[in-house]
Image (cartoon, rainbow, N blue to C red):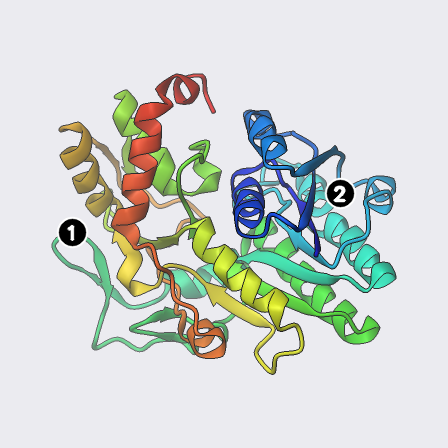
Amino acid sequence: MNVLITGIAGFVGSRLALGLADRHPDWQITGIDNLSRRGSEINLPLLRSRGVRFIHGDVRNREDVDELPKADWLIDCAANPSVLAGIDGGASQVVQHNLVGTLHLLEKCRRDTCGFLMLSTSRVYSIETLAGISIQPRVDRFEPDPNGTFPSGFSGLGVAENFPTSAPVSLYGATKLASEVMALEYGYTFDFPVWINRCGVLAGAGQFGKIDQGIFSYWIYQWMLGRPLSYIGFGGEGLQVRDLFGPEDLLDLLLKQMADPARDAPRVLNVGGGLESSLSLKQLSQYCEQRFGPKEVSSQPETRAFDIPYYVTDISRVTNAWNWHPQQNATDLLDEIATWSQSNRIVIEAGF
């Protein structure tokens, strides 16, 4: 089996590659990355030590993609992942990274009849609709109001795949949603398998701790280093909620999808930790205090334009379709991040 991974030097791409190398040492794993994210180069020696082939290139350049070797499956992890990307006037860069690059990859899949596994995002869902969900504060987190009226696609289990995707979803979310549509059309028109996984927050050891990678590693690193933290928006109490899951569990699903490309199953799936692995910033602070000691967190009550108070992934569809459920819970992942951070403090302090 030949597998090609884009964005292979990043957190998710590198962890998927290493996981594949461990589970299938006879597979040929090749990856491409432009190394634009500071710190990504530190993953290269580990990848090479496992026999993973690295190609320095950029999916935005058609020529770089055309020169990639043929593969049976392409896992697309390359993206500008920030919901704030482009708001400073650089929208064309977001489109180039997240849409044009995807089109180049789909053309390759068409030519090679290569299966396409797209890592999409929960950010394809309507910001206004998410912000309008009826919630109420509990002791240390927001919870859906049992007496509230919920939009289509939302229940006590969280956000399902039929939740509205109407604008605004952010420039980032729009490029990923457009890429989803093109991927499905390419797969249908040119007869190659396509699976789209709308991922929630991925977290785990080795994450660089940038805020656009997700709040969990960032919060733990800042707490450990004694740097300022603040509850921003929604009253400034830290009650906003997200769920998280790890790359190893994502890999379990991708392997199932690669093994059964013709399976009669939905092509678009929400993938995350689910309700069981959700927690608020306040609960995350409680974890950090137990692990590292007390710390003051400031408060900024004003809510920013792209922030949402509550997002939990409803994983019912992926569980029913693929018998998939994350094996690592939130505490497992937080422990993994905290342990790694303490062993790699110098790297984290360097700004990675």
The reply to whether residue 233 is in sight is no
Where, quadrant-wise, is the N terminus in this rendering? bottom right
Q: Which residue is mark 2?
A: 59
Q: Amino acid at mark 2?
A: Val
Cα–Cα span, label 1 and label 2:
43 Å
Find residue 276 and report its horizontal and vertical position in percent.
27, 62
Q: Indicate which label's residue lies in the foreground, 1 or 2.
A: 2
On screen, 265 above or below 80? below
Find residue 68 and report its horizontal and vertical position in percent.
81, 44
Is residue 246 toward the left or the right of residue 26 in the image? left
Is residue 54 toward the left or the right of residue 289 in the image? right
* Residue nearest the viewer, comparing 226 with 3: 3
Q: Earlier in the sequence, mark 1 or mark 2?
A: 2
Q: Which residue is mark 1?
A: 140
| Residue 175: image tag | none
On screen, 262 above or below 175? below
Is residue 193 toward the left or the right of residue 23 in the image? right
Q: Amino acid at mark 1?
A: Asp
